[in-house]
Image (cartoon, rainbow, N blue to C red):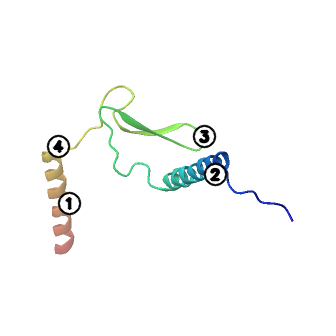
Amino acid sequence: MPIIAPPNPETRKIVSLVTDLEQRMRRAEAGLRAAQLKNASITDGGLNIYDDNGVIRTVLGKQTDGSSPLRPSTTLILLLFLLLLSLFLISLLS
């Protein structure tokens, strides 16, 4: 039967460091499983979306040429709504 010596200061320090490292690894691994962009924002930039081959499929936000995606104007949205509404009403009447 092996003789177990009482913990000495060096052993306590090593155990403390290993315990600290285990806790840090658990927190880091939990962070990798969590949503990474939950409360993130992009200011004056873009987010590149790549496919499995590493080819850029789309860019969210500022485009590579410095432009921003077009936003539909209120007038355009209203016209589209009226067009859809009129098509719906025509379908009801026929």
Q: Residue 44 appears at what percent x and percent y?
A: 30, 31
Would residue 58 be found to the left or right of residue 16 on screen? left
Looking at marks 2 and 3 on the same chain, the residue that comes earlier in the sequence is marked by 2
Pick whichever, 41 or 69, lies toward us.
41
- The answer for how far apart the CA atoms under marks 1 and 2 are is 70 Å
Identify the image quadrant of the N terminus.
bottom right
Query: Can I make out residue 56 in this image?
Result: yes
Pick whichever, 61 or 86, lies toward us.
61
* SS of the residue under disc 1: helix
Q: Residue 32 appears at what percent x and percent y?
A: 52, 51
Q: Nearer the viewer, mark 3 or mark 4?
A: 3
Which residue, given by chain and number where applicable, does mark 2 sit on? Answer: 15
Q: Which residue type carries mark 4?
A: Ser
Which residue, given by chain and number where applicable, does mark 1 sit on? Answer: 84
Identify the image quadrant of the C terminus.
bottom left
x 17%, y 50%: residue: 77
Q: Dot 3: within a 10 Å radius of its alpha carbon, few (fewer than 14), some, or many (20 or more) residues? A: few
Would residue 87 be found to the left or right of residue 44 on screen? left
Q: Are marks 3 and 4 in contact (CB under 8 Å)?
A: no
Which residue, given by chain and number where applicable, does mark 4 sit on? Answer: 73
Q: Dot 4: within a 10 Å radius of its alpha carbon, few (fewer than 14), some, or many (20 or more) residues? A: few
Q: Which residue type carries mark 1?
A: Leu
Q: Nearer the viewer, mark 1 or mark 4?
A: 4
Looking at marks 1 and 2 on the same chain, the residue that comes earlier in the sequence is marked by 2
| Res. 53 mark | 3
Q: Residue 27 appears at what percent x and percent y?
A: 51, 53
Q: Dot 1: within a 10 Å radius of its alpha carbon, few (fewer than 14), some, or many (20 or more) residues? A: few
Q: Which residue type carries mark 2?
A: Val
Looking at marks 3 and 4 on the same chain, the residue that comes earlier in the sequence is marked by 3
